[in-house]
Amino acid sequence: MTTTADHAAAPLAGPVPRTSTLRLVRSELRWVLRRPRTLVALGLLLLVPVAMGVTLVLSSTPAGGSGRGGPPLLGAVIGNGLVLPIAALSITMMLLMPLVVSMSAADALAGEAAHGTLRGLLLAPVGRVRLVLVKAVGVLTVAALAAGAVAVGGWVTGVALIGGDGLVTLSGTTLPLGTATLRVALAAAWVAAQMAAVGAVALAVSAATDHPLVVMAAIMAGLILFTVLGGLSALDWLHPVLLTDGWLSLADMLRDPLPTDNLVTGLLRAGCYALIGLSLAIARTTTREG
Amino acid sequence: MKRRKATLTAAAAGTVAGVVGLGLLALPTSASSAPSLPPVGAEQLVESVLREQPPAMGGTVKVDNALGLPAIPGVPEGSALLGGGETRVWLDGHGRGRAQIASSGREQTIVHDGTTTWRWDSSSRTAVRSTHPDAKKPEGTVDPSAAARQLISTIRSSSTVAVDGTARVANRDAYELVLTPAPSERTVLREVRVAVDAEKRVPLRVTVLANGSSDPVLQAGFTELAFGEQDAGLFKFEPPAGATVKDDERKPDRNAAKDHPKPKIVGDGWDTAVVVDLPKGKERGEQDPLAMVKQLGKPVEGAYGRGWLISTKVGSALVTESGRAALGAVPEQVLVEALGSTR
């Protein structure tokens, strides 16, 4: 059962609201991170770059043999291990990571509603805005952990299995290990921000339904729709609005000097989606029948 | 109840702010009005462009093309320069430069460090080196004002040249130099506009407009530009570990001229057509160019026999069965005449 008691007890424990929010967040995080499916999903994400690395090592053709087809970045990984975390991020962020994030967002509100435990949370003397924000922190944490898992898995696999002196960028320059690691961290943070935007929208759907499956289906359908729309050149004018449109610019992290334009635009776009998602989630939860 | 209302208002405001933010991201950025600059004559403008050495600068060039090119099988859309890709350019003002042509998941880098030019392609991980021992061009010997006068008089024989207003390109004030073909020219082009930086006299943007369309068919220009000292490390290239390093095998000109039949130029000015014999692609293990033309082109017939016509918004190409090709920024009729006159 959920931690209704924890949530309810928090504001009674003391008049200081800050501590109680902190306690709410802590109990939410404990709740999210103890869920076996969260852990399994994060573990599987960690394994994706490992599997990619092993496959590449086993099947690697000599340098220059980057075959046609397949994700364009994969060819750059051969003999250049530090590209692996970024290639893995760019592959998992398309569907796998949104799946994990929307799963946690589905559990956050719709899941509680399905279990009948949301009613308790809504009746508890915790502001509904605060409730949504605490849930959002939980989703954000999963997003950050998902991106972090792929980045760490990729980094370790890349350095240990594939190796290479520093990171050979797409531009033909070589970044030393420290700078390259910083780039990987930056890429992971950027992906986490994109996933937070997905999570916020998923939270809005989650607030509007009692069925967790609807949340995941809606997010997957939305992503696929956005990808299709993004592929139609007749809809050029629409593309800057699509969340997925800027996701390919993750490859910019492998260029030197780092071109920031598209990455910053991507962040702003993600911020807009996060704001919309969070606002709608709050509005829906506030108007919900207790 | 009051609190609930306030929450809902805030949530609505948040939603609206997010939507407006997305709208702002989608809006085109070039909405600034034309600056007012002191008037300048066309000759003077061209002369100053020829006189000024490109200064140290760094920027991003974007090419937008609406040429109406047929989709070529095997060549991915958005490849290289023409697909709306971005090219980052750096110049140090003393003849050294660097260009990075970005496309999805790959990049081509060209570095000229004064004596050696490196071409790097990330998809094949190859660095091609070509050296120019006598790179210094005798530039000081040409008088820019005389050259400008000659250039303008050559251009004036077939077109009108004028400075037509001003523009804002990459946040810099610029003059718009406009070349319009004379009415007697048989071309599909309407005009070519070149935006020249008002202060540094560097061309910032080239726009090609064709008949029958108000949008530019081709536009190449800076989207970002900063003048000033650039990082010296940009003008060096070290082939990275694991790269294939090759020396450029193409000897300058002499052999190339033997391999390729010399193209013949028919006409002058805007309705120039180039007639060339196609190389036989099969000997080189490449795709036979004629086979590709057959796929892309529209079959036509005339005094030249059977042929295929490929037309775009900026010009057309006519390839005959016998392997001759004529191309130019002209309608089909001019190409037919060019083929006839060079037989």
Image: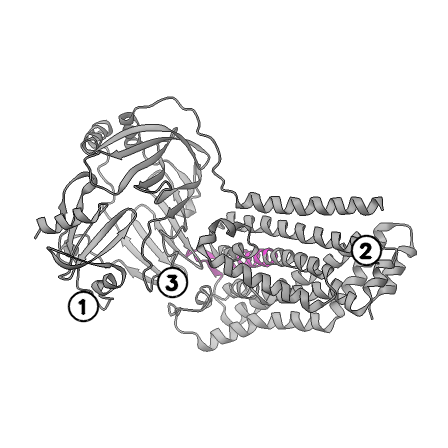
Q: From the image, which quarter does the C terminus of chain A lie in? A: bottom right
Residue A171 inside the magenta-drawn segment: yes
- Is the same chain shared between marks 2 and 3? no
Task: Please state which of residues B29 and A157 is positioned toward the viewer in this rendering.
Answer: B29
Instruction: Answer whether residue A152 is visible to the viewer in this image.
Output: no
Q: Quadrant of residue B194?
A: top left
From the top left corner, tell me how far across and down residue A106 is, in percent: 71, 65
- Judging from the image, what secondary structure is the residue with disc 2 in? helix
* Residue A156, percent from left and from top: 57, 68
Q: Is residue B296 left or right of residue B221?
A: left
Residue at image location 52% in from the left, 55% down from the top: A245
Q: Which residues are magenta?
A: A166-190
Distance, label 2 to label 3, CA atoms, is 51 Å
Q: Which residue is mark 1?
A: B283
Mark 1 → mark 3, Cα distance in angstroms? 27 Å
Q: Secondary structure at mark 1?
A: helix
**Tag of residue A151:** none
Task: Check the picture and name the quadrant holding the N terminus of chain A.
Answer: bottom right
Left or right of residue B176, residue B287 in this image: left
Q: Residues within 10 Å of mark 3 (few under 14, many from 20)?
A: many
Amino acid type assigned to the residue bearing label 1 in the image: Glu
Q: Nearer the viewer, mark 1 or mark 3?
A: 1
Mark 2: give few (<14), some (14-19) or many (20+) Cα within 10 Å.
few
- A20 magenta-colored: no
Which label sits in the foreground, 1 or 2? 1
Secondary structure under tag 3 reads loop
User: For mark 2, what is the residue?
Assistant: A22
- Residue A148, position in %: x, y? 63, 63
Q: Indicate which disc residue B125 carries.
A: 3
Q: Amino acid at mark 3?
A: Arg
Q: Which circle, 2 or 3, is nearer the viewer?
A: 2
Q: Position of residue B175 (x, y in %)?
A: 37, 30
